[in-house]
Amino acid sequence: MAISRRSFLIGAGSIGVGAAAVGGYLLSRDGKILFDDKTYAMPITTDYTLPEQVDVAVIGGGLAGIITALELAQKGISVAVFEKGKVAAEQSSRAFGWVSSAGDLGPTLALSHQSKDFWHKINQRIEADTSYRMIGSTTFLLTDEQIAEQEQWIKQAKQEADIDAKIITGAKLKERLGGPTATDWKAAIYQETDGGLEPPIAGPTLAEYARSIGVKIYQDCAVRGIETSGGKVSAVVTEKGTVLCDAAVVAGGMWSRRFLGNLDISIPQLGLFSSVQSVKADKPGPLGVGSAGNAAWRQQVDGEYSVSYVSPMSPIVPDSFKLFPEFFGTLLDYFDTVDLDLSNDFIKTAQMATSWDNDEMTPFEKLRVFNIRADERKLEESVRHMEEEFQNMAGAKVTKKWGGYIDATPDSVPIIDEVDAIPGLFICTGFSGHGLAMIPAASKLTADLIAGDQPMVDPSHYALARFSA
Ligand SMILES: Cc1cc2nc3c(=O)[nH]c(=O)nc-3n(C[C@H](O)[C@H](O)[C@H](O)COP(=O)(O)OP(=O)(O)OC[C@H]3O[C@@H](n4cnc5c(N)ncnc54)[C@H](O)[C@@H]3O)c2cc1C
Protein backbone atom coordinates (compact mmCIF):
# COMPACT_ATOMS: atom_id res chain seq x y z
CA MET A 1 0.00 0.00 0.00
CA ALA A 2 1.64 3.26 -1.10
CA ILE A 3 1.20 6.39 0.97
CA SER A 4 1.44 9.38 -1.35
CA ARG A 5 3.98 12.09 -0.63
CA ARG A 6 1.17 14.51 0.06
CA SER A 7 -2.38 13.32 -0.27
CA PHE A 8 -4.93 15.88 -1.33
CA LEU A 9 -7.29 15.37 1.54
CA ILE A 10 -5.22 14.17 4.36
CA GLY A 11 -3.77 15.47 7.47
CA ALA A 12 -4.78 13.55 11.31
CA GLY A 13 -6.48 13.60 16.74
CA SER A 14 -9.41 13.68 19.93
CA ILE A 15 -12.46 15.84 20.04
CA GLY A 16 -13.99 15.87 23.43
CA VAL A 17 -16.20 18.83 22.58
CA GLY A 18 -19.90 18.97 23.16
CA ALA A 19 -22.10 19.93 20.24
CA ALA A 20 -23.35 22.98 22.09
CA ALA A 21 -19.84 24.44 21.83
CA VAL A 22 -20.50 25.38 18.21
CA GLY A 23 -23.13 27.90 19.03
CA GLY A 24 -26.77 26.94 19.33
CA TYR A 25 -28.01 28.56 16.13
CA LEU A 26 -26.16 26.09 13.96
CA LEU A 27 -27.20 22.90 15.58
CA SER A 28 -30.49 21.14 15.70
CA ARG A 29 -31.84 20.14 19.11
CA ASP A 30 -30.19 16.73 18.90
CA GLY A 31 -26.82 18.38 18.30
CA LYS A 32 -26.67 17.77 14.52
CA ILE A 33 -24.84 20.32 12.41
CA LEU A 34 -27.33 22.08 10.17
CA PHE A 35 -26.48 22.36 6.50
CA ASP A 36 -28.33 24.42 3.97
CA ASP A 37 -28.94 21.92 1.17
CA LYS A 38 -28.46 24.49 -1.57
CA THR A 39 -25.43 26.35 -0.32
CA TYR A 40 -23.94 24.07 2.32
CA ALA A 41 -22.64 27.08 4.22
CA MET A 42 -24.16 28.84 7.22
CA PRO A 43 -25.95 31.95 5.96
CA ILE A 44 -24.45 35.31 6.88
CA THR A 45 -25.66 38.89 6.87
CA THR A 46 -25.01 40.57 3.55
CA ASP A 47 -24.32 44.20 2.61
CA TYR A 48 -26.43 45.75 -0.16
CA THR A 49 -25.43 49.32 -1.01
CA LEU A 50 -22.19 49.30 -2.97
CA PRO A 51 -19.54 51.75 -1.80
CA GLU A 52 -18.18 54.27 -4.29
CA GLN A 53 -14.63 53.43 -3.37
CA VAL A 54 -12.59 51.08 -1.18
CA ASP A 55 -8.87 50.57 -0.80
CA VAL A 56 -9.03 46.89 -1.75
CA ALA A 57 -11.71 44.85 -3.54
CA VAL A 58 -11.64 41.10 -2.90
CA ILE A 59 -13.11 38.89 -5.63
CA GLY A 60 -14.49 35.71 -4.02
CA GLY A 61 -15.92 35.06 -0.56
CA GLY A 62 -14.32 31.70 0.20
CA LEU A 63 -11.90 31.29 3.09
CA ALA A 64 -9.07 32.88 1.08
CA GLY A 65 -11.09 36.01 0.30
CA ILE A 66 -12.57 36.32 3.78
CA ILE A 67 -9.29 35.88 5.69
CA THR A 68 -7.44 38.19 3.30
CA ALA A 69 -10.13 40.83 3.93
CA LEU A 70 -9.88 40.28 7.68
CA GLU A 71 -6.10 40.70 7.64
CA LEU A 72 -6.36 43.85 5.51
CA ALA A 73 -9.01 45.35 7.77
CA GLN A 74 -6.78 44.74 10.79
CA LYS A 75 -4.16 46.85 9.08
CA GLY A 76 -6.67 49.72 8.83
CA ILE A 77 -7.27 49.20 5.08
CA SER A 78 -10.86 49.51 3.81
CA VAL A 79 -12.06 46.31 2.09
CA ALA A 80 -15.11 44.99 0.27
CA VAL A 81 -15.58 41.31 -0.59
CA PHE A 82 -17.69 40.45 -3.64
CA GLU A 83 -19.11 36.93 -3.78
CA LYS A 84 -21.03 35.71 -6.84
CA GLY A 85 -23.08 33.28 -4.71
CA LYS A 86 -22.97 32.82 -0.96
CA VAL A 87 -19.96 33.19 1.32
CA ALA A 88 -17.96 29.95 1.58
CA ALA A 89 -20.57 28.01 -0.42
CA GLU A 90 -18.11 26.35 -2.80
CA GLN A 91 -14.88 24.57 -1.75
CA SER A 92 -14.72 26.28 1.63
CA SER A 93 -17.92 24.62 2.88
CA ARG A 94 -17.51 21.29 1.11
CA ALA A 95 -14.07 20.44 2.48
CA PHE A 96 -13.38 17.40 4.58
CA GLY A 97 -12.25 19.60 7.45
CA TRP A 98 -8.68 18.43 8.05
CA VAL A 99 -6.33 21.21 9.17
CA SER A 100 -3.03 19.43 8.93
CA SER A 101 0.56 19.90 7.85
CA ALA A 102 1.11 16.14 7.38
CA GLY A 103 3.39 15.42 4.42
CA ASP A 104 4.09 19.10 3.69
CA LEU A 105 7.56 20.35 2.83
CA GLY A 106 8.98 23.62 1.48
CA PRO A 107 6.38 26.17 0.36
CA THR A 108 3.35 24.20 1.59
CA LEU A 109 4.90 23.49 5.00
CA ALA A 110 5.81 27.17 5.36
CA LEU A 111 2.12 28.06 4.98
CA SER A 112 0.48 25.15 6.85
CA HIS A 113 2.88 25.46 9.78
CA GLN A 114 2.45 29.24 10.07
CA SER A 115 -1.34 28.86 9.78
CA LYS A 116 -1.56 26.67 12.88
CA ASP A 117 -1.07 29.64 15.17
CA PHE A 118 -4.05 31.37 13.52
CA TRP A 119 -6.32 28.36 14.00
CA HIS A 120 -5.17 27.63 17.55
CA LYS A 121 -5.95 31.21 18.66
CA ILE A 122 -8.89 32.11 16.41
CA ASN A 123 -11.82 31.31 18.71
CA GLN A 124 -10.33 33.45 21.46
CA ARG A 125 -9.26 36.18 19.06
CA ILE A 126 -12.71 36.71 17.57
CA GLU A 127 -14.68 35.64 20.66
CA ALA A 128 -16.78 33.31 18.55
CA ASP A 129 -16.67 29.59 17.85
CA THR A 130 -15.37 28.87 14.36
CA SER A 131 -15.66 25.12 15.18
CA TYR A 132 -11.87 24.66 14.91
CA ARG A 133 -10.54 22.06 17.37
CA MET A 134 -6.95 20.92 17.83
CA ILE A 135 -7.78 17.21 17.68
CA GLY A 136 -4.51 15.84 16.27
CA SER A 137 -3.88 13.79 13.14
CA THR A 138 -2.98 10.12 12.86
CA THR A 139 -2.06 8.10 9.78
CA PHE A 140 -1.83 4.42 10.62
CA LEU A 141 1.14 2.48 9.24
CA LEU A 142 1.46 -1.20 8.48
CA THR A 143 4.92 -1.87 7.09
CA ASP A 144 8.52 -0.98 7.94
CA GLU A 145 8.71 0.72 4.56
CA GLN A 146 5.81 3.05 5.42
CA ILE A 147 7.33 3.84 8.82
CA ALA A 148 10.71 4.61 7.21
CA GLU A 149 9.00 6.88 4.67
CA GLN A 150 7.26 8.86 7.43
CA GLU A 151 10.46 9.04 9.54
CA GLN A 152 12.21 10.49 6.53
CA TRP A 153 9.46 13.14 6.15
CA ILE A 154 9.72 14.04 9.89
CA LYS A 155 13.48 14.46 9.54
CA GLN A 156 13.17 16.70 6.48
CA ALA A 157 10.26 18.74 7.88
CA LYS A 158 12.05 19.33 11.20
CA GLN A 159 14.88 20.99 9.29
CA GLU A 160 12.36 23.53 8.00
CA ALA A 161 9.91 24.08 10.86
CA ASP A 162 9.35 23.25 14.49
CA ILE A 163 6.81 20.49 13.79
CA ASP A 164 5.62 18.08 16.50
CA ALA A 165 5.08 14.99 14.28
CA LYS A 166 6.23 11.69 15.75
CA ILE A 167 5.89 7.96 15.22
CA ILE A 168 3.71 6.37 17.87
CA THR A 169 3.33 2.70 18.89
CA GLY A 170 1.98 0.83 21.94
CA ALA A 171 -0.55 2.47 24.26
CA LYS A 172 -0.67 5.78 22.34
CA LEU A 173 -1.32 3.95 19.08
CA LYS A 174 -4.11 1.97 20.76
CA GLU A 175 -5.67 5.14 22.17
CA ARG A 176 -5.76 6.78 18.72
CA LEU A 177 -7.34 3.69 17.14
CA GLY A 178 -10.24 4.20 19.52
CA GLY A 179 -11.25 0.51 19.74
CA PRO A 180 -10.69 -2.90 18.14
CA THR A 181 -9.45 -2.93 14.53
CA ALA A 182 -9.31 -5.58 11.81
CA THR A 183 -5.68 -4.77 11.00
CA ASP A 184 -2.80 -5.17 13.41
CA TRP A 185 -1.39 -1.66 12.78
CA LYS A 186 2.31 -1.48 13.56
CA ALA A 187 2.63 2.26 14.18
CA ALA A 188 1.22 5.66 13.21
CA ILE A 189 2.48 9.11 12.45
CA TYR A 190 0.86 11.52 14.90
CA GLN A 191 0.77 15.32 15.07
CA GLU A 192 -0.90 16.71 18.16
CA THR A 193 -1.06 20.27 16.83
CA ASP A 194 -3.13 19.30 13.76
CA GLY A 195 -6.85 19.72 13.92
CA GLY A 196 -10.21 19.86 12.24
CA LEU A 197 -13.10 22.22 11.66
CA GLU A 198 -16.66 22.22 10.33
CA PRO A 199 -16.33 23.81 6.88
CA PRO A 200 -19.96 25.08 6.68
CA ILE A 201 -19.38 26.99 9.92
CA ALA A 202 -15.78 28.25 9.90
CA GLY A 203 -15.87 30.53 6.82
CA PRO A 204 -19.21 32.18 7.61
CA THR A 205 -18.20 32.73 11.28
CA LEU A 206 -15.02 34.45 10.15
CA ALA A 207 -17.05 36.47 7.63
CA GLU A 208 -19.42 37.71 10.35
CA TYR A 209 -16.39 38.72 12.40
CA ALA A 210 -14.86 40.48 9.39
CA ARG A 211 -18.12 42.45 8.99
CA SER A 212 -18.01 43.39 12.68
CA ILE A 213 -14.62 45.05 12.15
CA GLY A 214 -15.74 46.98 9.06
CA VAL A 215 -15.36 44.67 6.06
CA LYS A 216 -18.25 45.00 3.61
CA ILE A 217 -19.46 41.70 2.16
CA TYR A 218 -21.70 41.61 -0.92
CA GLN A 219 -23.28 38.26 -1.79
CA ASP A 220 -24.97 37.42 -5.12
CA CYS A 221 -22.64 40.02 -6.57
CA ALA A 222 -20.25 38.69 -9.20
CA VAL A 223 -17.25 40.68 -10.33
CA ARG A 224 -17.17 40.74 -14.13
CA GLY A 225 -13.81 42.40 -14.59
CA ILE A 226 -11.54 45.25 -13.63
CA GLU A 227 -10.80 48.74 -14.93
CA THR A 228 -7.34 50.23 -15.09
CA SER A 229 -5.96 53.73 -15.12
CA GLY A 230 -2.40 54.30 -16.33
CA GLY A 231 -2.08 50.49 -16.48
CA LYS A 232 -2.92 50.06 -12.79
CA VAL A 233 -6.06 48.67 -11.20
CA SER A 234 -8.52 51.49 -10.63
CA ALA A 235 -11.89 49.71 -10.16
CA VAL A 236 -13.77 46.42 -10.15
CA VAL A 237 -16.87 46.09 -12.30
CA THR A 238 -19.54 44.05 -10.56
CA GLU A 239 -22.92 42.98 -11.91
CA LYS A 240 -24.42 45.68 -9.65
CA GLY A 241 -22.08 48.53 -10.45
CA THR A 242 -18.49 49.75 -10.46
CA VAL A 243 -16.45 50.24 -7.30
CA LEU A 244 -13.24 52.28 -7.41
CA CYS A 245 -10.26 50.67 -5.70
CA ASP A 246 -6.48 50.81 -5.52
CA ALA A 247 -6.02 47.05 -5.54
CA ALA A 248 -8.05 43.92 -6.26
CA VAL A 249 -7.43 40.36 -5.07
CA VAL A 250 -8.56 37.40 -7.17
CA ALA A 251 -9.50 34.76 -4.58
CA GLY A 252 -11.97 32.96 -6.84
CA GLY A 253 -11.10 29.32 -6.11
CA MET A 254 -11.71 27.19 -9.20
CA TRP A 255 -13.06 30.24 -11.09
CA SER A 256 -9.80 32.19 -10.83
CA ARG A 257 -8.43 30.78 -14.11
CA ARG A 258 -11.58 31.81 -16.01
CA PHE A 259 -11.65 35.32 -14.45
CA LEU A 260 -7.97 35.96 -15.12
CA GLY A 261 -8.15 34.38 -18.60
CA ASN A 262 -10.56 37.14 -19.63
CA LEU A 263 -7.78 39.61 -18.68
CA ASP A 264 -5.27 37.63 -20.79
CA ILE A 265 -3.54 36.26 -17.72
CA SER A 266 -3.08 32.52 -17.81
CA ILE A 267 -2.83 30.50 -14.62
CA PRO A 268 -2.54 26.70 -14.69
CA GLN A 269 -5.42 25.41 -12.60
CA LEU A 270 -7.48 22.21 -12.99
CA GLY A 271 -10.49 20.95 -11.07
CA LEU A 272 -10.24 17.71 -9.08
CA PHE A 273 -13.47 16.20 -7.93
CA SER A 274 -13.88 14.73 -4.45
CA SER A 275 -16.75 13.60 -2.21
CA VAL A 276 -17.33 13.45 1.53
CA GLN A 277 -20.07 11.99 3.75
CA SER A 278 -21.16 12.26 7.37
CA VAL A 279 -21.80 9.00 9.19
CA LYS A 280 -23.28 8.25 12.59
CA ALA A 281 -21.95 5.29 14.58
CA ASP A 282 -23.26 3.97 17.91
CA LYS A 283 -19.81 3.88 19.49
CA PRO A 284 -16.82 6.20 19.00
CA GLY A 285 -14.26 5.14 16.37
CA PRO A 286 -10.72 6.44 15.75
CA LEU A 287 -9.75 9.77 17.27
CA GLY A 288 -9.31 13.16 15.61
CA VAL A 289 -8.56 13.31 11.91
CA GLY A 290 -6.73 10.50 10.20
CA SER A 291 -6.38 7.85 7.57
CA ALA A 292 -5.94 4.12 7.45
CA GLY A 293 -5.26 2.67 4.02
CA ASN A 294 -7.73 4.23 1.60
CA ALA A 295 -10.22 5.55 4.15
CA ALA A 296 -9.95 8.91 5.85
CA TRP A 297 -12.04 10.40 8.65
CA ARG A 298 -12.58 13.40 10.87
CA GLN A 299 -14.46 13.48 14.16
CA GLN A 300 -17.12 16.15 13.79
CA VAL A 301 -18.09 18.40 16.66
CA ASP A 302 -21.58 16.87 16.73
CA GLY A 303 -20.19 13.38 17.40
CA GLU A 304 -20.59 12.09 13.84
CA TYR A 305 -17.69 11.33 11.51
CA SER A 306 -16.81 12.81 8.16
CA VAL A 307 -15.61 9.89 6.05
CA SER A 308 -13.96 9.99 2.66
CA TYR A 309 -11.41 8.21 0.50
CA VAL A 310 -7.85 9.22 -0.15
CA SER A 311 -7.81 9.72 -3.94
CA PRO A 312 -9.64 12.56 -5.69
CA MET A 313 -10.79 12.30 -9.29
CA SER A 314 -9.80 14.56 -12.14
CA PRO A 315 -12.62 15.02 -14.64
CA ILE A 316 -11.35 15.43 -18.18
CA VAL A 317 -12.49 18.86 -19.31
CA PRO A 318 -11.31 21.14 -22.16
CA ASP A 319 -8.66 22.66 -19.85
CA SER A 320 -7.21 19.17 -19.23
CA PHE A 321 -5.94 19.19 -22.83
CA LYS A 322 -4.71 22.78 -22.76
CA LEU A 323 -2.90 22.24 -19.46
CA PHE A 324 -1.63 18.72 -20.15
CA PRO A 325 2.09 19.66 -20.33
CA GLU A 326 1.90 21.55 -17.01
CA PHE A 327 0.00 18.82 -15.17
CA PHE A 328 1.73 15.80 -16.72
CA GLY A 329 4.38 15.64 -13.97
CA THR A 330 1.77 15.94 -11.22
CA LEU A 331 -0.38 13.21 -12.68
CA LEU A 332 2.65 10.93 -12.82
CA ASP A 333 3.49 11.80 -9.20
CA TYR A 334 -0.01 11.00 -8.08
CA PHE A 335 -0.58 8.20 -10.56
CA ASP A 336 -1.79 5.83 -7.87
CA THR A 337 -4.02 8.38 -6.17
CA VAL A 338 -5.74 10.42 -8.89
CA ASP A 339 -8.46 8.81 -11.04
CA LEU A 340 -9.27 10.32 -14.42
CA ASP A 341 -12.84 10.53 -15.60
CA LEU A 342 -14.43 11.73 -18.82
CA SER A 343 -17.64 13.13 -17.44
CA ASN A 344 -20.50 15.57 -17.97
CA ASP A 345 -18.20 18.29 -16.68
CA PHE A 346 -16.62 18.32 -20.14
CA ILE A 347 -19.86 19.54 -21.65
CA LYS A 348 -20.67 21.94 -18.77
CA THR A 349 -17.31 23.71 -18.82
CA ALA A 350 -17.03 23.62 -22.62
CA GLN A 351 -20.29 25.61 -22.78
CA MET A 352 -19.11 28.37 -20.44
CA ALA A 353 -17.85 31.61 -21.97
CA THR A 354 -14.11 32.20 -21.72
CA SER A 355 -14.26 35.87 -22.68
CA TRP A 356 -16.77 38.68 -22.19
CA ASP A 357 -17.08 42.41 -21.84
CA ASN A 358 -17.78 44.05 -18.50
CA ASP A 359 -21.30 45.02 -19.58
CA GLU A 360 -22.21 41.40 -20.42
CA MET A 361 -23.53 38.67 -18.19
CA THR A 362 -20.67 36.35 -17.19
CA PRO A 363 -20.41 32.65 -16.26
CA PHE A 364 -20.13 33.78 -12.63
CA GLU A 365 -23.71 35.07 -12.69
CA LYS A 366 -24.96 32.00 -14.57
CA LEU A 367 -23.59 29.57 -12.02
CA ARG A 368 -23.80 31.12 -8.55
CA VAL A 369 -22.86 27.99 -6.62
CA PHE A 370 -21.22 24.98 -8.23
CA ASN A 371 -23.16 21.98 -6.90
CA ILE A 372 -21.68 18.61 -7.67
CA ARG A 373 -23.12 15.18 -7.08
CA ALA A 374 -21.28 12.92 -4.64
CA ASP A 375 -19.44 9.86 -5.94
CA GLU A 376 -21.74 7.22 -4.43
CA ARG A 377 -19.52 4.27 -5.29
CA LYS A 378 -16.37 5.67 -3.73
CA LEU A 379 -18.22 6.88 -0.65
CA GLU A 380 -19.82 3.47 -0.14
CA GLU A 381 -16.42 1.82 -0.44
CA SER A 382 -14.92 4.18 2.13
CA VAL A 383 -17.68 3.70 4.69
CA ARG A 384 -17.47 -0.07 4.23
CA HIS A 385 -13.72 0.16 4.77
CA MET A 386 -14.25 2.16 7.99
CA GLU A 387 -16.81 -0.35 9.26
CA GLU A 388 -14.58 -3.32 8.51
CA GLU A 389 -11.46 -1.71 9.95
CA PHE A 390 -12.83 0.02 13.03
CA GLN A 391 -15.20 -2.43 14.64
CA ASN A 392 -16.93 0.22 16.78
CA MET A 393 -18.14 1.73 13.55
CA ALA A 394 -19.99 -1.37 12.36
CA GLY A 395 -23.51 -0.46 11.25
CA ALA A 396 -22.64 3.25 10.85
CA LYS A 397 -25.44 5.15 9.09
CA VAL A 398 -24.75 7.69 6.37
CA THR A 399 -26.53 10.97 7.20
CA LYS A 400 -25.23 13.31 4.47
CA LYS A 401 -23.17 13.13 1.25
CA TRP A 402 -21.70 15.91 -0.83
CA GLY A 403 -19.16 16.56 -3.59
CA GLY A 404 -16.89 19.45 -4.45
CA TYR A 405 -14.24 20.67 -6.85
CA ILE A 406 -10.69 21.18 -5.67
CA ASP A 407 -8.68 23.79 -7.59
CA ALA A 408 -5.25 22.29 -8.19
CA THR A 409 -2.03 23.79 -9.54
CA PRO A 410 0.61 21.61 -11.21
CA ASP A 411 2.92 21.70 -8.15
CA SER A 412 0.11 21.74 -5.52
CA VAL A 413 1.43 25.09 -4.30
CA PRO A 414 -0.92 28.11 -4.32
CA ILE A 415 -0.36 31.24 -6.40
CA ILE A 416 0.09 34.33 -4.21
CA ASP A 417 1.40 37.19 -6.25
CA GLU A 418 0.87 40.59 -7.82
CA VAL A 419 0.37 40.34 -11.58
CA ASP A 420 3.38 41.98 -13.27
CA ALA A 421 1.37 43.28 -16.22
CA ILE A 422 -1.35 44.92 -14.06
CA PRO A 423 -0.02 46.53 -10.91
CA GLY A 424 -2.56 46.41 -8.12
CA LEU A 425 -4.00 43.06 -9.28
CA PHE A 426 -3.19 40.33 -6.75
CA ILE A 427 -3.88 36.59 -6.88
CA CYS A 428 -4.49 34.29 -3.89
CA THR A 429 -5.68 30.98 -5.23
CA GLY A 430 -4.82 27.36 -6.16
CA PHE A 431 -4.83 25.70 -2.72
CA SER A 432 -4.88 22.23 -4.26
CA GLY A 433 -7.04 20.47 -1.68
CA HIS A 434 -5.14 21.92 1.25
CA GLY A 435 -6.61 25.37 1.72
CA LEU A 436 -8.02 25.02 5.22
CA ALA A 437 -4.50 24.24 6.34
CA MET A 438 -2.69 26.91 4.30
CA ILE A 439 -5.08 29.83 3.79
CA PRO A 440 -4.53 31.76 7.05
CA ALA A 441 -0.81 32.26 6.30
CA ALA A 442 -1.44 32.64 2.56
CA SER A 443 -4.01 35.38 3.21
CA LYS A 444 -1.67 37.12 5.66
CA LEU A 445 1.02 37.02 2.97
CA THR A 446 -1.41 38.49 0.42
CA ALA A 447 -2.35 41.30 2.83
CA ASP A 448 1.34 41.99 3.56
CA LEU A 449 2.15 42.19 -0.16
CA ILE A 450 -0.71 44.63 -0.73
CA ALA A 451 0.22 46.79 2.25
CA GLY A 452 3.95 46.66 1.41
CA ASP A 453 4.70 45.09 4.80
CA GLN A 454 7.51 42.62 5.50
CA PRO A 455 6.07 39.18 4.67
CA MET A 456 6.56 36.38 7.18
CA VAL A 457 7.20 33.78 4.46
CA ASP A 458 9.28 34.09 1.32
CA PRO A 459 6.79 35.16 -1.40
CA SER A 460 8.96 33.97 -4.29
CA HIS A 461 7.81 30.33 -3.85
CA TYR A 462 4.25 31.33 -4.71
CA ALA A 463 4.99 33.56 -7.72
CA LEU A 464 2.99 33.03 -10.90
CA ALA A 465 6.22 33.29 -12.92
CA ARG A 466 7.35 29.87 -11.64
CA PHE A 467 5.09 28.25 -14.22
CA SER A 468 6.54 30.13 -17.19
CA ALA A 469 10.03 29.11 -16.03
C1 LIG B 1 -14.39 17.76 -1.18
C2 LIG B 1 -13.28 18.65 -0.69
C3 LIG B 1 -12.54 18.27 0.44
C4 LIG B 1 -11.51 19.09 0.91
N1 LIG B 1 -10.89 18.76 2.08
C5 LIG B 1 -9.93 19.58 2.59
C6 LIG B 1 -9.33 19.29 3.84
O1 LIG B 1 -9.68 18.31 4.52
N2 LIG B 1 -8.35 20.11 4.29
C7 LIG B 1 -7.94 21.21 3.58
O2 LIG B 1 -7.02 21.90 4.03
N3 LIG B 1 -8.54 21.55 2.41
C8 LIG B 1 -9.52 20.76 1.91
N4 LIG B 1 -10.15 21.08 0.73
C9 LIG B 1 -9.69 22.26 0.01
C10 LIG B 1 -10.25 23.55 0.59
O3 LIG B 1 -11.66 23.42 0.75
C11 LIG B 1 -9.92 24.68 -0.38
O4 LIG B 1 -8.53 24.69 -0.62
C12 LIG B 1 -10.31 26.05 0.15
O5 LIG B 1 -11.63 26.06 0.64
C13 LIG B 1 -10.17 27.06 -0.99
O6 LIG B 1 -10.71 28.28 -0.56
P1 LIG B 1 -10.83 29.46 -1.62
O7 LIG B 1 -11.37 30.62 -0.89
O8 LIG B 1 -9.56 29.58 -2.36
O9 LIG B 1 -11.89 28.90 -2.70
P2 LIG B 1 -13.48 28.75 -2.59
O10 LIG B 1 -13.91 28.31 -1.25
O11 LIG B 1 -13.88 27.91 -3.74
O12 LIG B 1 -14.00 30.24 -2.77
C14 LIG B 1 -13.90 30.95 -3.98
C15 LIG B 1 -15.14 31.82 -4.06
O13 LIG B 1 -14.98 32.76 -5.10
C16 LIG B 1 -16.26 33.01 -5.66
N5 LIG B 1 -16.05 33.61 -6.98
C17 LIG B 1 -15.39 33.09 -8.02
N6 LIG B 1 -15.35 33.95 -9.02
C18 LIG B 1 -16.01 35.06 -8.63
C19 LIG B 1 -16.33 36.30 -9.26
N7 LIG B 1 -15.94 36.58 -10.49
N8 LIG B 1 -17.03 37.21 -8.53
C20 LIG B 1 -17.43 36.95 -7.27
N9 LIG B 1 -17.17 35.77 -6.64
C21 LIG B 1 -16.46 34.85 -7.32
C22 LIG B 1 -16.89 31.62 -5.69
O14 LIG B 1 -18.29 31.68 -5.78
C23 LIG B 1 -16.40 31.02 -4.38
O15 LIG B 1 -17.34 31.19 -3.33
C24 LIG B 1 -11.19 20.30 0.23
C25 LIG B 1 -11.94 20.67 -0.89
C26 LIG B 1 -12.98 19.87 -1.35
C27 LIG B 1 -13.78 20.32 -2.52
Image: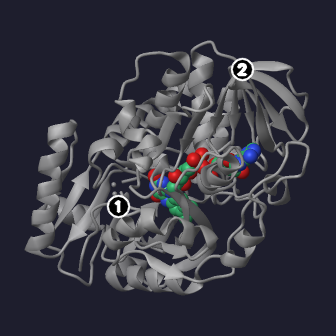
Q: Is residue 77 above or below residue 315?
A: above
**Residue found at x 44% / y 38%:** 463
Q: Is residue 75 left or right of residue 247?
A: left
Q: Is residue 436 above or below residue 245?
A: below
Which percent across, then down, holds residue 99? Answer: 42, 49
Q: Compute the Cα span from label 1 to label 2.
A: 56 Å
Which percent across, then down, holds residue 122? Answer: 49, 31
**Residue found at x 83% / y 26%:** 243
Residue lying at the far top of the rendered structure: 76
Q: Is residue 251 left or right of residue 103?
A: right
Which percent across, then down, holds residue 320? Answer: 55, 70
**Residue found at x 31% / y 69%:** 333
Check disc 2 and report its element: helix, strand or loop: loop
The residue where tag 2 is placed is 230
Which percent across, then down, holds residue 84? Answer: 78, 47
Q: Quadrant of residue 288?
A: bottom left
Task: Say whether marks 1 and 2 touch (CB < 8 Å).
Answer: no
Does the beta carbon at disc 1 come under 8 Å from ligand 1? no
Task: Name which residue type carries label 1.
Answer: Leu
Frontmost of labels 1 and 2 is: 2
Q: Is residue 126 above or below residue 115?
A: above
Q: Quadrant of residue 290?
A: bottom left
**Residue found at x 46% / y 86%:** 381
Residue 19 visible in this rendered orientation of the protein? no
Q: Quadrant of residue 349?
A: bottom right
Q: Is residue 350 above or below residue 204?
A: below
Q: Is residue 9 left or right of residue 127?
A: left
The residue where tag 1 is placed is 287
Task: Name which residue type carries label 2.
Answer: Gly
N-terminal-most mark, 1 or 2:
2
Check disc 1 and report its element: helix, strand or loop: loop
Quarter of the image where the N terminus is located? bottom left
